Image (cartoon, grey):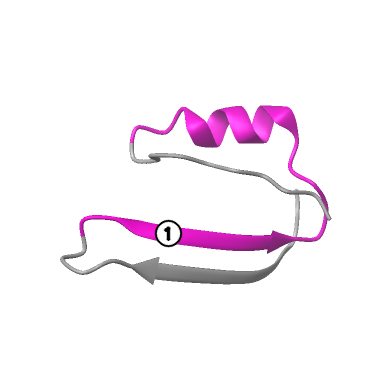
Amino acid sequence: NINIEEIENIIFEGGIAACCTMKLQAAATADMLKQISENANVISISHVEI
């Protein structure tokens, strides 16, 4: 489990697409990123570790 410290959702006009930004307590694992990207409702993902 990873704690989500902050989350921001932007829903685009018409409600057909949205953008979600999550700031996590720790980096997401490769398996987590794979599971997210395999979701049919997800267009694209990116992961940046700071």
Q: Which residue is mark 1?
A: 19
Vertical placement of residue 31 versus 20, above or below: above
At x 34% / y 40%, what residue is drawn?
Answer: 41
Which residue is rendered at x = 42% and y = 59% of the image?
19
Total marks placed: 1
Q: Is residue 21 magenta?
A: yes
Q: Residue furthest left?
A: 14
Left or right of residue 39, residue 49 in this image:
right
**Seen in the image, is 24 located left or right of residue 37?**
right
Q: Residue at x 74, y 43 (%)?
A: 28
The x and y percentages for residue 45 are 53, 41
Q: Secondary structure at mark 1?
A: strand
Tell me the quarter of the picture where residue 23 sits. Answer: bottom right
Residue 30, image x, y percentages: 72, 29
How far from the left and from the top, in percent, is residue 43? Answer: 38, 39
Tell me: 35 left or right of 41. right
For residue 49: magenta?
A: no
From the viewer's perspective, is residue 15 above or below residue 34? below
Q: Quadrant of the C terminus?
A: bottom right
Residue type at the position of mark 1: Cys
Disc 1: CA contacts within 10 A as few (<14), some (14-19) or many (>=20):
few
Residue at 65% across, 35% down: 32
Question: Image quadrant of residue 39?
Answer: top left
Range of residues picked out in magenta: 16-40
